[in-house]
């Protein structure tokens, strides 16, 4: 078993220094991006994630090792070129995990934590799930199956998470065009955190933005459409327990209470957030279509 460092733990001092630097820069530029209670809630969520990570990562490692030892199709050596291949394979896995986390309520129940802040800064990057680590790893199970060593996979997953820290900021407007074209950036990820109908469920990238462009989920940040951070229905709480589990409670009530068919109960777990069995709900596609229709009608009114 190759030994790889837990780079997330080593990066914690960097996180603290970067947040202090961002606070200084945004204050100097009069960008009101931090709010004390919100930032402390995000940090509390991050600490909880790290603490529970000792359990969830043990489960993930056991699952990866079991598949690697008993079912792997090939044996990919631990060398420089295999890390290059793994970089793309891991980022591809992350894209689909992230996309499904917005399109399936069972995964949204844990991922919603990261979107629950109405502010956007480096502390928001630390607002991580307490439950997702115990089951979201299924999107990476194909990697040990084809022969990547579990230690390599966990290291690359940490590298991806570390990369995504710096893109949670309003202190950086745009990167060079060549960089924006290929890589995930603060501008691209601000869109992802937007509750604006145009921005909902867009830009699911981890490191490379190319997946969103290839699979039709890319949306550039527009100057005339300022990002409104948070959820379509904000939870308005700083309580870490409520932040961590509010959607689990809401989903459970929708699925297991009231008079509805078994099929409808299951659909509350599998359908996108906003879906209702009686047809009264609206998912992100509905909200986006309504927005486009409204903009079209306004444009027609101006031109007439």
Image (tube, rainbow, N blue to C red):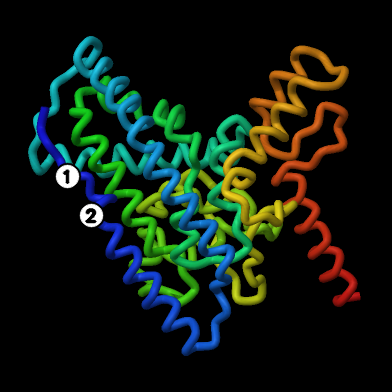
Say which residue appears at 41% left-offset and 26% top-offset: 138
Q: Nearer the viewer, residue 110 or 164?
A: 110
- Which residue is rendered at x = 57% and y = 79% of the image? 32
Q: Find out whether the residues at labels 1 and 2 contact each other: C-beta distance under 8 Å.
A: yes
Classify mark 2: helix, strand or loop: helix
Task: Please give the name of the residue rendered at 76% of the width and 28% of the height, measured from the top-left corner.
Answer: 253
Residue indicated by mark 1 = 5
The N terminus appears in which quarter of the rendering? Answer: top left
Q: Residues within 10 Å of mark 2 (few under 14, many from 20)?
A: few
Quarter of the view holding residue 295:
bottom right
Q: Position of residue 159 (x, y in %)?
A: 27, 49
Residue 295's label in the rendered image is none
- Ranked by sequence position, the earlier of labels 1 and 2 is 1
Residue that badge 2 annotates? 10
Please identify the quarter of the rendering in which residue 104 is found.
top right
| Residue 51 drawn at (x, y percent) | 38, 41
Tell me the distance, in whole angstroms, between the alpha carbons under discs 1 and 2.
Answer: 8 Å
71 lies left or right of 217: left
Question: Is 199 or 49 nearer to us in this picture?
Answer: 49
Disc 1 is placed on an element classified as loop
Horizontal side, residue 265 vs residue 238: left or right: right
How far across and how far down the image is residue 140, in percent?
35, 30
Residue that protrudes farthest toward the top in the picture:
70
Q: Is residue 65 left or right of residue 303?
A: left
The residue that appears at 66% across and 65% down in the rendered structure is 228
């Amino acid at each position: 078993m190759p030994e790889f460092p837990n780079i997330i733990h080593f990066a914690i001092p960097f996180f603290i220094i970067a947040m202090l630097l961002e606070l200084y820069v945004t204050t100097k530029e009069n960008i009101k991006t931090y709010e004390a209670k919100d930032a402390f809630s995000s940090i509390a969520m991050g600490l909880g994630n790290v603490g529970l990570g000792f359990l969830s990562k043990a489960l993930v490692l056991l699952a990866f090792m079991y598949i690697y030892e008993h079912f792997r199709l090939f044996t990919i050596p631990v060398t420089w070129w295999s890390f290059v291949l793994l970089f793309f394979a891991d980022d591809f896995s992350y894209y689909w995990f992230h996309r499904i986390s917005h399109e399936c309520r069972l995964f949204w129940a844990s991922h919603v934590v990261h979107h629950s802040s109405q502010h956007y800064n480096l502390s928001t990057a630390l607002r991580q799930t307490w439950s997702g680590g115990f089951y979201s790893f299924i999107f990476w199970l194909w990697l040990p199956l084809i022969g990547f060593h579990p230690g390599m996979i966990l290291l690359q997953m940490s590298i991806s998470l570390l990369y995504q820290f710096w893109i949670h900021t309003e202190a950086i407007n745009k990167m060079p065009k060549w960089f924006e074209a290929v890589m995930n950036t603060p501008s691209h990820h601000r869109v992802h955190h937007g509750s604006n109908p145009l921005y909902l469920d867009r830009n699911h990238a981890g490191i490379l933005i190319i997946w969103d462009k290839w699979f039709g989920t890319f949306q550039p940040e527009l100057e005339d459409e300022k990002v409104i951070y948070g959820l379509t229905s904000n939870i308005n709480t700083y309580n870490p327990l409520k932040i961590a589990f509010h959607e689990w409670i809401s989903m459970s009530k929708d699925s297991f209470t009231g008079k509805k068919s078994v099929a409808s109960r299951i659909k509350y777990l599998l359908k996108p957030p906003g879906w209702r069995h009686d047809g009264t709900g609206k998912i992100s596609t509905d909200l986006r279509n309504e927005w486009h229709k409204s903009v079209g009608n306004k444009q027609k009114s101006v031109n007439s």
